Amino acid sequence: MQEDFLHYVWQHQYFGKTDLQTVEGEELVVLRPGHRNSDAGPDFLNARLLIGDVEWNGAVEIHLRASDWRRHQHQVDKKYDQVVLHVVYTADVPVHRTDGTPVPTLNLGPRIEPALLTAYNALTTAPIPTLLPCAGALPTVPELTRLMMVERVLLDRVTEKAAVLQALHARTGHDWESTAWHALAAGFGFKKNTEPLARLALALPLAVLRKHRYDLRQTEALLFGQAGLLPPADSAPDDYCAALRREYDFLAHKYNLGPTAMAAHEWNFLRLRPANFPTVRLAQLAALLHAQPRLFQPLLDAPDVRTLEKILLTSVSDYWQNHYRPGVSAAKVPGLGKSSAHLLIINVVVPLRVAHARSIDNQAGVEAAVDLLTQLPREQNSILAIYDELQFRHRTAADSQGLLALHNGYCAPRRCLHCAIGSRILQRNVAATK
Protein backbone atom coordinates (compact mmCIF):
# COMPACT_ATOMS: atom_id res chain seq x y z
CA MET A 1 0.00 0.00 0.00
CA GLN A 2 1.15 3.54 -0.82
CA GLU A 3 0.42 6.63 1.23
CA ASP A 4 -1.37 8.01 -1.81
CA PHE A 5 -4.16 5.53 -1.13
CA LEU A 6 -4.66 6.87 2.38
CA HIS A 7 -4.58 10.42 0.98
CA TYR A 8 -7.33 9.40 -1.42
CA VAL A 9 -9.40 7.76 1.32
CA TRP A 10 -9.07 10.77 3.62
CA GLN A 11 -9.72 13.36 0.90
CA HIS A 12 -12.95 11.66 -0.18
CA GLN A 13 -13.80 10.42 3.32
CA TYR A 14 -14.19 6.83 2.11
CA PHE A 15 -14.16 5.15 5.51
CA GLY A 16 -16.60 4.16 8.24
CA LYS A 17 -17.74 7.05 10.45
CA THR A 18 -19.76 5.11 13.02
CA ASP A 19 -18.49 5.82 16.56
CA LEU A 20 -15.51 7.62 15.07
CA GLN A 21 -12.85 8.13 17.73
CA THR A 22 -9.18 8.93 18.03
CA VAL A 23 -6.78 6.31 19.36
CA GLU A 24 -6.86 8.27 22.61
CA GLY A 25 -10.60 7.62 22.93
CA GLU A 26 -11.96 11.08 22.06
CA GLU A 27 -14.99 11.44 19.79
CA LEU A 28 -14.02 12.73 16.33
CA VAL A 29 -16.17 14.56 13.77
CA VAL A 30 -14.65 15.61 10.44
CA LEU A 31 -16.19 18.96 9.54
CA ARG A 32 -13.75 19.62 6.70
CA PRO A 33 -10.93 17.25 5.61
CA GLY A 34 -8.77 20.12 4.32
CA HIS A 35 -7.08 20.47 0.95
CA ARG A 36 -4.03 18.68 -0.41
CA ASN A 37 -0.74 20.45 0.14
CA SER A 38 1.60 20.27 -2.85
CA ASP A 39 4.44 22.03 -1.04
CA ALA A 40 6.63 21.03 1.90
CA GLY A 41 4.86 20.41 5.17
CA PRO A 42 1.77 18.47 6.29
CA ASP A 43 -0.32 16.59 3.73
CA PHE A 44 -3.63 18.46 4.19
CA LEU A 45 -4.11 22.08 5.22
CA ASN A 46 -7.06 24.02 6.63
CA ALA A 47 -8.84 20.97 8.02
CA ARG A 48 -11.69 21.56 10.49
CA LEU A 49 -12.27 18.88 13.11
CA LEU A 50 -14.28 18.43 16.26
CA ILE A 51 -12.23 16.38 18.75
CA GLY A 52 -14.11 15.85 21.98
CA ASP A 53 -15.70 19.20 22.81
CA VAL A 54 -13.05 21.28 21.07
CA GLU A 55 -13.13 22.45 17.44
CA TRP A 56 -9.72 22.47 15.77
CA ASN A 57 -8.57 24.19 12.60
CA GLY A 58 -5.21 23.06 11.28
CA ALA A 59 -3.31 20.47 9.31
CA VAL A 60 -3.64 16.71 8.90
CA GLU A 61 -0.61 14.47 8.39
CA ILE A 62 -1.00 10.99 6.90
CA HIS A 63 1.30 7.96 7.25
CA LEU A 64 1.05 4.24 6.74
CA ARG A 65 2.42 3.72 10.26
CA ALA A 66 2.33 6.18 13.13
CA SER A 67 6.03 5.52 13.69
CA ASP A 68 6.73 7.12 10.29
CA TRP A 69 6.22 10.45 12.11
CA ARG A 70 9.46 9.91 14.00
CA ARG A 71 11.21 8.28 11.04
CA HIS A 72 10.56 11.45 9.02
CA GLN A 73 11.74 13.62 11.95
CA HIS A 74 8.47 15.53 12.24
CA GLN A 75 8.88 15.69 16.03
CA VAL A 76 11.68 18.24 15.53
CA ASP A 77 10.15 20.11 12.58
CA LYS A 78 8.07 23.15 13.56
CA LYS A 79 6.11 22.97 10.28
CA TYR A 80 4.33 19.98 11.80
CA ASP A 81 3.33 21.76 15.00
CA GLN A 82 0.19 22.85 13.12
CA VAL A 83 -0.96 19.21 12.75
CA VAL A 84 -4.18 18.64 14.69
CA LEU A 85 -4.74 15.03 13.57
CA HIS A 86 -2.41 12.19 12.58
CA VAL A 87 -4.21 9.78 10.21
CA VAL A 88 -2.56 6.35 9.89
CA TYR A 89 -3.26 2.87 8.61
CA THR A 90 -1.54 1.32 11.63
CA ALA A 91 -1.28 3.13 14.97
CA ASP A 92 1.85 1.56 16.41
CA VAL A 93 3.20 4.44 18.56
CA PRO A 94 2.02 7.79 19.96
CA VAL A 95 3.56 10.91 18.41
CA HIS A 96 4.35 14.43 19.66
CA ARG A 97 4.98 17.94 18.39
CA THR A 98 8.25 19.82 18.94
CA ASP A 99 7.01 21.08 22.33
CA GLY A 100 6.16 17.55 23.49
CA THR A 101 2.37 17.86 23.23
CA PRO A 102 0.67 14.73 21.86
CA VAL A 103 -0.92 14.68 18.41
CA PRO A 104 -4.36 13.01 18.28
CA THR A 105 -4.30 9.94 16.03
CA LEU A 106 -6.99 8.32 13.88
CA ASN A 107 -6.38 4.64 13.14
CA LEU A 108 -7.91 4.36 9.67
CA GLY A 109 -6.98 0.75 8.87
CA PRO A 110 -9.99 -1.00 10.46
CA ARG A 111 -12.40 1.53 8.97
CA ILE A 112 -11.53 1.10 5.28
CA GLU A 113 -14.05 -1.05 3.43
CA PRO A 114 -12.47 -4.39 2.40
CA ALA A 115 -14.04 -4.07 -1.06
CA LEU A 116 -12.34 -0.69 -1.57
CA LEU A 117 -8.99 -2.10 -0.51
CA THR A 118 -9.46 -5.11 -2.81
CA ALA A 119 -10.25 -2.82 -5.76
CA TYR A 120 -7.19 -0.70 -4.99
CA ASN A 121 -4.96 -3.78 -4.83
CA ALA A 122 -6.38 -5.01 -8.13
CA LEU A 123 -5.41 -1.72 -9.80
CA THR A 124 -1.91 -1.59 -8.38
CA THR A 125 -0.96 -5.24 -8.94
CA ALA A 126 -2.48 -5.88 -12.39
CA PRO A 127 0.10 -7.13 -14.92
CA ILE A 128 1.47 -4.61 -17.40
CA PRO A 129 2.24 -3.70 -20.13
CA THR A 130 -0.08 -6.27 -21.77
CA LEU A 131 -3.15 -4.66 -20.21
CA LEU A 132 -4.01 -1.48 -18.38
CA PRO A 133 -4.33 -1.82 -14.60
CA CYS A 134 -8.04 -1.06 -14.86
CA ALA A 135 -8.73 -3.26 -17.90
CA GLY A 136 -10.90 -5.77 -16.07
CA ALA A 137 -13.13 -3.10 -14.53
CA LEU A 138 -13.40 -0.77 -17.55
CA PRO A 139 -16.86 -2.03 -18.60
CA THR A 140 -18.20 -0.49 -15.36
CA VAL A 141 -16.86 2.97 -16.26
CA PRO A 142 -19.25 5.24 -18.20
CA GLU A 143 -18.07 6.36 -21.63
CA LEU A 144 -18.43 9.99 -20.54
CA THR A 145 -15.90 9.47 -17.73
CA ARG A 146 -13.37 8.07 -20.19
CA LEU A 147 -13.89 10.90 -22.66
CA MET A 148 -13.60 13.62 -20.03
CA MET A 149 -10.39 12.12 -18.63
CA VAL A 150 -8.78 11.84 -22.07
CA GLU A 151 -9.79 15.42 -22.93
CA ARG A 152 -8.39 16.63 -19.62
CA VAL A 153 -4.98 14.99 -20.08
CA LEU A 154 -4.86 16.08 -23.73
CA LEU A 155 -5.10 19.70 -22.62
CA ASP A 156 -2.48 19.02 -19.93
CA ARG A 157 -0.13 17.50 -22.54
CA VAL A 158 -0.52 20.41 -24.96
CA THR A 159 -0.16 22.94 -22.14
CA GLU A 160 3.07 21.30 -20.94
CA LYS A 161 4.54 21.45 -24.44
CA ALA A 162 3.42 25.06 -24.76
CA ALA A 163 5.05 25.93 -21.43
CA VAL A 164 8.39 24.70 -22.81
CA LEU A 165 8.00 27.04 -25.79
CA GLN A 166 6.94 29.93 -23.56
CA ALA A 167 10.18 29.46 -21.63
CA LEU A 168 12.07 29.32 -24.95
CA HIS A 169 10.30 32.50 -26.01
CA ALA A 170 11.61 34.24 -22.88
CA ARG A 171 15.15 32.99 -23.55
CA THR A 172 15.06 34.33 -27.12
CA GLY A 173 14.24 37.83 -25.94
CA HIS A 174 10.50 37.40 -26.55
CA ASP A 175 11.03 36.94 -30.29
CA TRP A 176 8.38 34.64 -31.74
CA GLU A 177 10.23 34.24 -35.04
CA SER A 178 13.30 32.96 -33.22
CA THR A 179 11.11 30.75 -31.04
CA ALA A 180 9.56 29.22 -34.17
CA TRP A 181 13.02 28.57 -35.64
CA HIS A 182 14.28 26.74 -32.55
CA ALA A 183 11.03 24.75 -32.19
CA LEU A 184 10.95 23.71 -35.85
CA ALA A 185 14.63 22.79 -35.88
CA ALA A 186 14.15 20.46 -32.88
CA GLY A 187 10.95 19.11 -34.44
CA PHE A 188 12.78 18.10 -37.61
CA GLY A 189 14.90 15.80 -35.44
CA PHE A 190 11.91 13.43 -35.04
CA LYS A 191 13.11 12.03 -31.69
CA LYS A 192 16.37 10.40 -32.79
CA ASN A 193 18.01 13.71 -33.70
CA THR A 194 15.90 16.19 -31.74
CA GLU A 195 18.72 17.09 -29.37
CA PRO A 196 21.42 17.56 -32.07
CA LEU A 197 19.07 19.71 -34.17
CA ALA A 198 18.20 21.81 -31.13
CA ARG A 199 21.92 22.39 -30.60
CA LEU A 200 22.34 23.27 -34.28
CA ALA A 201 19.66 25.95 -33.91
CA LEU A 202 21.65 27.40 -31.02
CA ALA A 203 24.86 27.27 -33.08
CA LEU A 204 23.33 28.97 -36.11
CA PRO A 205 21.92 32.44 -35.33
CA LEU A 206 18.59 33.19 -36.96
CA ALA A 207 19.90 36.61 -37.93
CA VAL A 208 22.49 34.92 -40.16
CA LEU A 209 19.93 32.59 -41.72
CA ARG A 210 17.58 35.48 -42.44
CA LYS A 211 20.21 37.17 -44.57
CA HIS A 212 20.65 34.09 -46.81
CA ARG A 213 17.23 32.37 -46.86
CA TYR A 214 16.57 33.56 -50.39
CA ASP A 215 19.52 31.49 -51.68
CA LEU A 216 18.85 27.77 -51.15
CA ARG A 217 22.48 26.77 -51.69
CA GLN A 218 23.70 29.22 -49.08
CA THR A 219 20.99 28.05 -46.66
CA GLU A 220 22.11 24.44 -47.17
CA ALA A 221 25.74 25.46 -46.77
CA LEU A 222 25.01 27.13 -43.43
CA LEU A 223 23.00 24.19 -42.09
CA PHE A 224 25.22 21.33 -43.28
CA GLY A 225 28.45 23.18 -42.58
CA GLN A 226 27.49 24.26 -39.07
CA ALA A 227 26.24 20.70 -38.43
CA GLY A 228 29.72 19.38 -39.22
CA LEU A 229 28.42 17.24 -42.09
CA LEU A 230 30.46 18.74 -44.95
CA PRO A 231 33.96 17.33 -45.61
CA PRO A 232 36.75 19.75 -46.61
CA ALA A 233 36.42 20.99 -50.19
CA ASP A 234 39.59 19.23 -51.35
CA SER A 235 38.23 15.85 -50.18
CA ALA A 236 34.54 16.37 -51.01
CA PRO A 237 32.87 13.38 -52.72
CA ASP A 238 31.47 15.51 -55.57
CA ASP A 239 31.36 19.01 -57.00
CA TYR A 240 28.12 19.96 -55.22
CA CYS A 241 29.46 19.14 -51.78
CA ALA A 242 32.72 20.93 -52.59
CA ALA A 243 30.72 24.02 -53.59
CA LEU A 244 28.68 23.84 -50.38
CA ARG A 245 31.86 23.59 -48.33
CA ARG A 246 33.46 26.58 -50.03
CA GLU A 247 30.27 28.57 -49.50
CA TYR A 248 30.19 27.56 -45.85
CA ASP A 249 33.85 28.40 -45.25
CA PHE A 250 33.26 31.90 -46.63
CA LEU A 251 30.10 32.47 -44.55
CA ALA A 252 31.58 30.94 -41.40
CA HIS A 253 34.53 33.31 -41.65
CA LYS A 254 32.26 36.26 -42.38
CA TYR A 255 30.00 35.59 -39.37
CA ASN A 256 32.61 33.96 -37.09
CA LEU A 257 30.63 30.70 -36.93
CA GLY A 258 33.51 28.25 -36.62
CA PRO A 259 33.80 28.12 -32.81
CA THR A 260 30.19 26.97 -32.42
CA ALA A 261 30.17 24.37 -35.22
CA MET A 262 29.16 20.79 -34.46
CA ALA A 263 30.88 17.54 -35.45
CA ALA A 264 29.60 14.68 -37.64
CA HIS A 265 29.76 12.15 -34.78
CA GLU A 266 27.07 14.10 -32.88
CA TRP A 267 24.38 12.97 -35.32
CA ASN A 268 22.46 9.69 -35.11
CA PHE A 269 22.24 7.53 -38.24
CA LEU A 270 22.06 4.12 -36.53
CA ARG A 271 18.78 2.21 -36.86
CA LEU A 272 17.25 4.89 -39.05
CA ARG A 273 15.86 4.34 -42.52
CA PRO A 274 17.78 6.41 -45.08
CA ALA A 275 14.72 8.64 -45.61
CA ASN A 276 15.02 9.62 -41.93
CA PHE A 277 18.76 10.35 -41.96
CA PRO A 278 19.61 13.72 -40.38
CA THR A 279 21.17 14.80 -43.67
CA VAL A 280 17.81 14.32 -45.39
CA ARG A 281 16.02 16.22 -42.61
CA LEU A 282 18.52 19.08 -42.88
CA ALA A 283 17.86 19.32 -46.62
CA GLN A 284 14.10 19.44 -45.90
CA LEU A 285 14.60 22.10 -43.23
CA ALA A 286 16.71 24.16 -45.63
CA ALA A 287 13.96 23.93 -48.26
CA LEU A 288 11.38 25.13 -45.73
CA LEU A 289 13.55 28.07 -44.65
CA HIS A 290 14.07 29.00 -48.31
CA ALA A 291 10.36 28.77 -49.16
CA GLN A 292 9.21 30.67 -46.06
CA PRO A 293 11.19 33.87 -45.47
CA ARG A 294 9.14 34.15 -42.27
CA LEU A 295 8.22 31.13 -40.18
CA PHE A 296 6.07 32.17 -37.26
CA GLN A 297 3.29 34.19 -38.84
CA PRO A 298 2.37 31.63 -41.55
CA LEU A 299 2.26 28.86 -38.91
CA LEU A 300 0.14 31.06 -36.65
CA ASP A 301 -2.29 32.25 -39.32
CA ALA A 302 -2.88 28.98 -41.21
CA PRO A 303 -6.63 28.32 -40.90
CA ASP A 304 -6.46 24.55 -41.19
CA VAL A 305 -4.27 21.48 -41.51
CA ARG A 306 -4.38 21.54 -45.30
CA THR A 307 -2.78 25.00 -45.34
CA LEU A 308 -0.13 23.90 -42.87
CA GLU A 309 0.68 20.89 -45.05
CA LYS A 310 1.30 23.22 -47.99
CA ILE A 311 3.68 25.27 -45.86
CA LEU A 312 5.63 22.28 -44.54
CA LEU A 313 5.73 20.05 -47.63
CA THR A 314 8.38 21.84 -49.68
CA SER A 315 10.65 20.36 -52.35
CA VAL A 316 14.34 19.92 -51.56
CA SER A 317 17.09 20.94 -53.99
CA ASP A 318 17.88 18.70 -56.95
CA TYR A 319 20.96 17.24 -55.25
CA TRP A 320 19.04 16.00 -52.20
CA GLN A 321 16.31 14.47 -54.30
CA ASN A 322 18.73 11.64 -55.08
CA HIS A 323 21.27 11.71 -52.23
CA TYR A 324 20.86 10.43 -48.67
CA ARG A 325 24.29 11.64 -47.53
CA PRO A 326 26.99 13.75 -49.16
CA GLY A 327 28.30 11.69 -52.08
CA VAL A 328 25.91 8.75 -51.43
CA SER A 329 23.40 8.69 -54.28
CA ALA A 330 20.07 6.89 -54.63
CA ALA A 331 17.51 6.53 -57.39
CA LYS A 332 15.05 8.75 -55.52
CA VAL A 333 14.91 10.08 -51.98
CA PRO A 334 11.36 10.55 -50.63
CA GLY A 335 10.51 14.08 -49.57
CA LEU A 336 8.95 15.06 -46.29
CA GLY A 337 5.79 12.94 -46.17
CA LYS A 338 2.37 13.88 -44.87
CA SER A 339 2.82 11.73 -41.79
CA SER A 340 5.99 13.67 -40.91
CA ALA A 341 4.23 16.97 -41.57
CA HIS A 342 1.46 15.86 -39.24
CA LEU A 343 3.99 15.10 -36.52
CA LEU A 344 5.40 18.60 -36.92
CA ILE A 345 1.89 20.04 -36.58
CA ILE A 346 1.29 17.96 -33.44
CA ASN A 347 4.63 18.58 -31.75
CA VAL A 348 5.56 22.04 -32.98
CA VAL A 349 2.74 24.03 -34.56
CA VAL A 350 -0.01 23.30 -32.02
CA PRO A 351 2.19 23.93 -28.95
CA LEU A 352 3.59 27.06 -30.60
CA ARG A 353 0.11 28.44 -31.24
CA VAL A 354 -1.02 27.54 -27.73
CA ALA A 355 2.07 29.23 -26.25
CA HIS A 356 1.33 32.40 -28.22
CA ALA A 357 -2.36 32.36 -27.30
CA ARG A 358 -1.54 31.91 -23.63
CA SER A 359 0.98 34.76 -23.74
CA ILE A 360 -1.81 37.16 -24.77
CA ASP A 361 -4.48 35.48 -22.63
CA ASN A 362 -6.46 34.34 -25.67
CA GLN A 363 -8.44 31.24 -24.64
CA ALA A 364 -10.18 31.09 -28.01
CA GLY A 365 -6.75 30.84 -29.64
CA VAL A 366 -5.85 27.94 -27.34
CA GLU A 367 -9.02 26.10 -28.29
CA ALA A 368 -8.49 26.77 -32.01
CA ALA A 369 -4.95 25.42 -31.81
CA VAL A 370 -6.04 22.24 -30.04
CA ASP A 371 -8.85 21.86 -32.58
CA LEU A 372 -6.20 21.38 -35.29
CA LEU A 373 -5.53 17.97 -33.76
CA THR A 374 -9.09 16.89 -34.56
CA GLN A 375 -8.34 17.55 -38.24
CA LEU A 376 -5.46 15.09 -38.26
CA PRO A 377 -5.79 11.32 -38.67
CA ARG A 378 -5.25 9.19 -35.61
CA GLU A 379 -1.77 7.89 -34.83
CA GLN A 380 -0.89 4.23 -34.58
CA ASN A 381 1.61 2.46 -32.35
CA SER A 382 1.79 -0.43 -29.90
CA ILE A 383 0.64 1.68 -26.94
CA LEU A 384 -2.41 3.05 -28.71
CA ALA A 385 -3.29 -0.48 -29.85
CA ILE A 386 -3.91 -1.37 -26.19
CA TYR A 387 -6.50 1.38 -25.87
CA ASP A 388 -8.08 0.43 -29.20
CA GLU A 389 -8.53 -3.11 -27.89
CA LEU A 390 -10.25 -1.75 -24.79
CA GLN A 391 -12.69 0.31 -26.87
CA PHE A 392 -11.44 3.79 -26.04
CA ARG A 393 -12.56 6.35 -28.61
CA HIS A 394 -9.72 6.81 -31.08
CA ARG A 395 -10.66 8.67 -34.24
CA THR A 396 -8.26 11.61 -34.59
CA ALA A 397 -4.82 12.78 -33.49
CA ALA A 398 -6.55 14.59 -30.62
CA ASP A 399 -7.65 11.20 -29.30
CA SER A 400 -4.17 9.76 -29.92
CA GLN A 401 -2.44 12.54 -28.03
CA GLY A 402 -4.91 12.28 -25.17
CA LEU A 403 -4.48 8.52 -24.89
CA LEU A 404 -0.69 8.81 -24.94
CA ALA A 405 -0.90 11.41 -22.18
CA LEU A 406 -3.19 9.11 -20.20
CA HIS A 407 -0.77 6.21 -20.62
CA ASN A 408 2.42 8.12 -19.81
CA GLY A 409 1.01 10.20 -16.99
CA TYR A 410 -1.36 7.78 -15.28
CA CYS A 411 -1.52 4.19 -16.54
CA ALA A 412 2.18 3.34 -16.83
CA PRO A 413 3.18 4.89 -13.47
CA ARG A 414 0.01 3.42 -11.84
CA ARG A 415 -1.39 6.80 -10.80
CA CYS A 416 -4.88 5.33 -10.78
CA LEU A 417 -5.92 7.30 -7.70
CA HIS A 418 -5.37 10.55 -9.60
CA CYS A 419 -7.27 9.36 -12.68
CA ALA A 420 -11.02 9.90 -13.10
CA ILE A 421 -11.33 6.38 -14.51
CA GLY A 422 -9.53 4.74 -11.59
CA SER A 423 -11.43 6.90 -9.12
CA ARG A 424 -14.75 5.86 -10.67
CA ILE A 425 -13.80 2.19 -10.31
CA LEU A 426 -12.92 2.68 -6.65
CA GLN A 427 -16.10 4.63 -5.96
CA ARG A 428 -18.19 1.62 -6.96
CA ASN A 429 -16.61 -0.25 -4.07
CA VAL A 430 -17.33 2.33 -1.39
CA ALA A 431 -20.16 1.45 0.99
CA ALA A 432 -22.57 4.10 2.16
CA THR A 433 -20.48 5.23 5.11
CA LYS A 434 -21.38 8.89 5.29
Image (cartoon, helix red, strand yellow):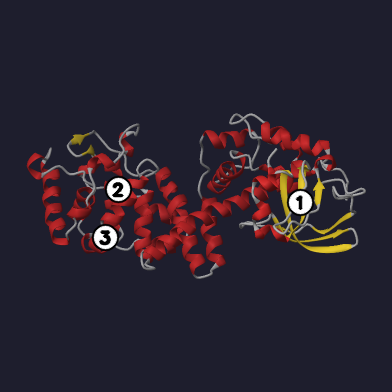
Mark earlier in primary sequence (1, 3): 1
Residue type for callout 3: Pro
Residue type for callout 2: Gln
- Quadrant of residue 258 within the rendered picture: bottom left
Please report the residue visible at 25 percent of the width from the left and 64 percent of the height from the top: 207
Please report the residue visible at 79 percent of the width from the left and 44 percent of the height from the top: 427
Residue type for callout 1: His
For label 3, the SS is loop
Q: Which quarter of the figure is the N terminus placed in? A: top right
397 sits left or right of 236 in the view: right
Residue 176, position as x, y percentages in the image:
38, 65
Decide if residue 207 is in sight here.
yes
Q: Name the residue under label 2.
A: 284
For label 2, the SS is helix
Of badges 1 and 3, nearer the viewer stands: 1
Residue 387, position as x, y percentages in the image:
61, 37
